[in-house]
Image (cartoon, rainbow, N blue to C red):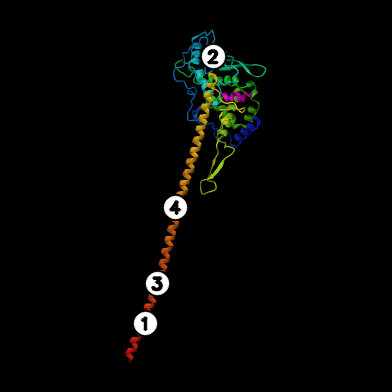
C-alpha cells in the first residue's frame, strides 16, 4: 500500500491532519474505553476485550516454576541464573517458567506469526538476568548480540528489580504493591519478548527504525491505555508527529513508542478496510449508489504459506519442522475458513437481493393488473352511460310520436 517508509509517514500524518486528530477514524484507536488495544483485542478488531490485567492470559497463579539450570519453552531454551539471591527473584523466575514466557510468546505468535520454532530463527536460547538499577528507566529489556552480517547470535532478558522488587504475589499478572500505575510485569515481558523473537527472526533487526521496533512491541500488548496523554498530544500536533516518526532514534522514548504504536495501528486499519485489487461490483438496488463490491483473496498455496516461491512445500520431515508446519497449516485453514465465511455472506446477500427482486416483480405485476382492472371498469361505466342515454332518447321520441297520433284522432 505504501512505496516506502516516507510515503507511509506522509500518508499517516496527512490523514491525521485532515481528520483534526481523530484517532478512532484514522487509527481505530479509542482512548475512551478500558481496552488496551492489543492486536488480539477488541479495540483492534477481534472479539476478545483486553484490559490491562488480561493482556497475558494466565489461567492460574503464576509463581512457582522450576528455575534450576534450563527450561525449554515453545522452542526456546531459557537459561536461569545460578545466583538468584532473594525470594522475589525466585518468584519472578518461577512465574516466567510456569506461565509468563509461554503466554507472552503465544501472544507474539498469535499476533505476527513469529516464534522460535521457525527454521530461519538464528538463536533459540535466552539468558535470564536480574539487576537493581535505580538510574535506569528500563523496567525490563532484551539485549541482542549480532555478528557482522546482522544475524543475532545471543539473547539476554534483564529484569530491573528496582521497579519489580515488591510484587503482589497474590496477583498472577505481576502487579506491584501500592503502585497501581506501574505497568504489570507480564505486559512488560510481552513487549520485551516481542523484541527477542523479532531479533531472532529478522536479519539486521537493530537497524530497523525505533518506531517500528517499539511500535510492533506496543501493538502486541496494546498501550493506548498507558500512553493516552502522549498519543492524544501527538494526534493534535501532526508536525510533531511527523518529526518523531522521521527521526525516532533521537526522539524521547515515550514519543517514539506512542508514534510507532499509532502508525502501525493506522497500517492495520488501512489494510483491514482496503479492497482487493480485483473486485466485481453488483447492482443490488434501484438507485445508482446501491451496489456491493465483491473481492476474493488469493487462496493459492503460496499465498497461504503452504509453499514457497521456489516451489518447496511445508515439511514434516523432522519434529521441529512438523511443529512449525502445524502453525502454518492452522493459519492457512483459518484464512480459508474466513474466506469461506465471506463467500457465504456474499451469497446470502445476493440471495436476499434476488428474493427482493422477485417480490418487487410480483408487486409491479399486481399493481399493473389493478390498474388494468380499474381502466376496464371505467370503460364499462362510460359504455353503460352512453347506452342508457341512447335508450332514453329513443323512448322519448317514441312517446312524442304517440302524443301526435292522439291529437290527430281527436280532430277527426
Q: Which residue is mark 3?
A: 387
The answer for how far apart the CA atoms under marks 2 and 3 are is 109 Å
Inspect this view and state whether residue 183 appears. no
Q: Which residue is mark 2?
A: 78
Q: Which type of secondary structure does the marked residue at label 4 adopt?
A: helix
In this rendering, position of residue 48 left or right of residue 264: left
The structure residue drawn at horizontal position 46% and vertical position 44%, both measured from the top left corner, is: 352
The answer for how far apart the CA atoms under marks 2 and 4 are is 72 Å
Q: Which residues are magenta?
A: 208-217
Q: State which quarter of the image contains the N terminus.
A: top right
The answer for how far apart the CA atoms under marks 3 and 4 are is 36 Å
Q: Are marks 1 and 2 in contact (CB under 8 Å)?
A: no
Q: Nearer the viewer, mark 4 or mark 1?
A: 4
Instruction: Please tell me how crowded label 1 is: few (under 14), some (14-19), or many (20+) other residues with Cα within 10 Å.
Output: few
Q: Which residue is mark 1?
A: 400
- Up the image or down, 348 lies above or below 29; here it is below
Q: Nearer the viewer, residue 191 or 25?
A: 191
Amino acid at each position: 500500500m505504501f512505496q516506502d517508509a516516507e510515503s507511509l509517514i506522509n500518508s499517516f500524518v496527512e490523514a491525521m491532519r485532515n481528520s483534526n486528530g481523530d484517532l478512532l477514524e484514522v487509527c481505530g484507536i479509542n482512548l475512551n474505553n478500558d481496552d488496551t488495544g492489543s492486536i488480539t483485542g477488541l479495540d483492534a478488531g477481534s472479539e476478545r476485550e483486553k484490559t490491562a490485567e488480561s493482556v497475558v492470559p494466565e489461567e492460574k497463579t503464576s509463581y512457582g516454576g522450576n528455575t534450576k539450570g534450563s527450561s525449554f519453552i515453545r522452542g526456546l531454551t531459557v537459561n536461569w541464573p545460578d545466583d538468584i539471591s532473594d525470594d522475589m527473584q525466585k518468584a519472578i523466575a518461577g512465574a516466567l517458567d510456569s506461565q509468563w514466557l509461554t503466554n507472552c510468546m503465544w501472544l507474539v505468535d498469535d499476533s505476527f506469526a513469529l516464534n522460535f520454532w521457525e527454521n530461519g530463527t538464528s538463536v533459540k536460547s535466552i539468558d535470564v538476568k536480574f539487576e537493581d538499577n535505580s538510574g535506569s528507566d528500563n523496567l525490563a529489556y532484551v539485549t541482542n548480540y549480532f555478528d557482522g552480517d546482522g544475524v543475532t547470535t545471543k539473547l539476554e532478558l534483564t529484569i530491573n528489580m528496582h521497579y519489580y522488587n515488591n510484587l503482589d504475589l497474590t496477583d498472577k499478572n505481576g502487579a506491584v504493591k501500592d503502585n497501581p500505575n506501574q505497568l504489570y510485569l507480564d505486559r512488560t515481558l510481552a513487549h520485551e519478548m516481542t523484541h527477542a523473537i523479532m531479533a531472532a527472526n529478522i536479519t539486521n533487526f537493530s537497524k530497523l527504525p525505533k518506531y517500528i521496533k517499539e511500535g510492533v512491541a506496543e501493538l502486541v500488548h496494546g498501550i493506548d491505555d498507558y500512553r493516552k496523554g502522549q498519543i492524544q498530544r501527538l494526534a493534535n500536533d501532526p508536525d510533531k508527529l511527523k518529526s518523531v516518526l522521521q527521526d525516532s532514534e533521537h526522539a524521547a522514548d515515550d514519543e517514539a513508542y506512542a508514534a510507532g504504536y499509532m502508525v502501525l495501528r493506522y497500517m492495520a486499519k488501512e489494510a483491514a478496510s482496503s479492497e482487493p485489487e480485483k473486485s466485481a461490483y453488483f447492482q443490488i438496488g434501484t438507485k445508482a449508489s446501491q451496489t456491493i463490491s465483491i473481492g476474493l483473496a488469493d487462496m493459492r498455496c503460496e499465498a497461504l504459506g503452504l509453499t514457497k516461491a521456489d516451489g518447496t512445500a511445508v515439511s514434516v520431515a523432522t519434529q521441529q519442522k512438523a511443529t512449525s508446519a502445524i502453525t502454518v497449516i492452522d493459519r492457512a485453514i483459518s484464512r480459508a475458513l474466513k474466506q469461506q465465511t465471506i463467500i457465504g455472506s456474499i451469497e446470502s446477500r445476493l440471495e436476499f437481493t434476488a428474493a427482493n427482486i422477485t417480490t418487487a416483480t410480483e408487486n409491479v405485476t399486481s399493481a399493473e393488473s389493478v390498474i388494468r382492472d380499474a381502466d376496464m371498469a371505467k370503460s364499462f361505466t362510460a359504455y353503460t352511460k352512453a347506452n342508457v342515454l341512447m335508450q332514453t332518447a329513443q323512448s322519448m321520441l317514441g312517446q312524442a310520436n304517440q302524443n301526435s297520433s292522439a291529437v290527430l284522432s281527436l280532430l277527426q
